[in-house]
Amino acid sequence: MFKPKSQILLSKARGVYLLLEEQIVKIQLQRSTDPDLLLSFSQLHTSQHTSNTIICIQVFYVGWPWSPLLKRQVFSGPVVTLKVFEDNVLVREFLEEKGNGRVLVVDGGGSLRCAILGGNPVVQGQNNGWAGIVVNGCVRDVDEINGCDIGVRALASHPMKANKKGIGEKHVPITIAGTRVCDGEWLYADTDGILISKMELSV
Ligand SMILES: O=C([O-])CC(=O)C(=O)O
Ligand SMILES: [Mg+2]
């Protein structure tokens, strides 16, 4: 186990450790649905610290079945949140904006009944400089998405299009798989999982 120079908050969880003070030197995640793991992270997250040298990290989606069909799994950036349900109008609206390296995190309520992200907005997101899109729901046009230079994570693919009523809420706190995600937080996605941090990390 890596020993930090100074303070460390060490989760009991297997293979997961946070190094604190000057920076996060290494983050290691294992896929797990172990409730102790999630508990230890939520305790870390909610515990009160007086020193702002302590960086609290939430683990987001450890153990979730992210679709392996999507190829660009590694990306990071500041978060923009969106909450919709089986409707993709606001998703498209966001990706028409300049991304400036941000990651759009869409809580689609986990619906597996239609796709709230298709190839067209992903191409737009790529062209507008978004770093990635995380969808708690389904995507379609998987081959088109995989041809794009932008990270995309979703639960699954589905051939059906979503509604186009424009219903949803932008920039609101969302809770996905028990983890609250807010605008301005930082998201780090790799092939092991997805992390949400209150602040930018050096990884
Ligand atoms: O048209 C839609 O609603 C979904 C789609 O395939 C795309 O955006 O590329
Ligand atoms: Mg399409």
Image (tube, helix red, strand yellow):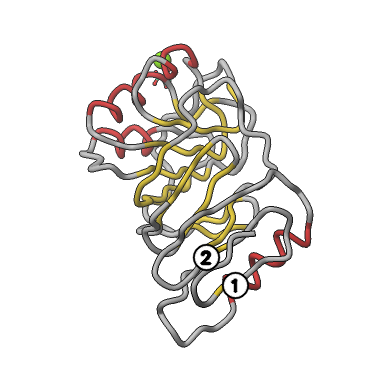
**Residue drawn where x is 54% and y is 83% of the image:** 48
Nearer to the camera, 16 or 78: 16
Q: Which residue is mark 1?
A: 9
Residue placed furthest toward the bottom = 50
Q: Position of residue 46 (x, y in %)?
A: 58, 75
Label 2 CA crowd tier, 10 Å (few <14, some 14–19, many 20+): many
Front-lying residue, 137 or 148: 148
Instruction: Residue at 56% x, 73% y: name it.
Output: 8
Residue 45: quadrant of the picture: bottom right
Residue 99 rendering spot, x and y as whole percentages: 25, 40
Amino acid type indicated by mark 1: Leu
The quadrant of the rendered image in which ligand 1 is seen is top left
Residue at 41% over, 35% down: 165
Residue 4 placement (x, y as % from top left): 53, 68
Q: Are marks 2 and 1 in contact (CB under 8 Å)?
A: no
Residue named by callout 2: 19
Left or right: 170, with 155 as reference point = left
Q: Secondary structure at mark 2?
A: strand
Give the residue at the far top of this rendering. Answer: 143
Picture quarter with the N terminus: bottom right
Q: Write the residue at 34% across / 24% down.
A: 149
Q: Nearer the viewer, residue 6 or 203?
A: 6
Residue 30 higher or lower than 38, as above or below: above
Q: Name the mark on residue 40.
A: none
Q: Type of residue at label 2?
A: Leu
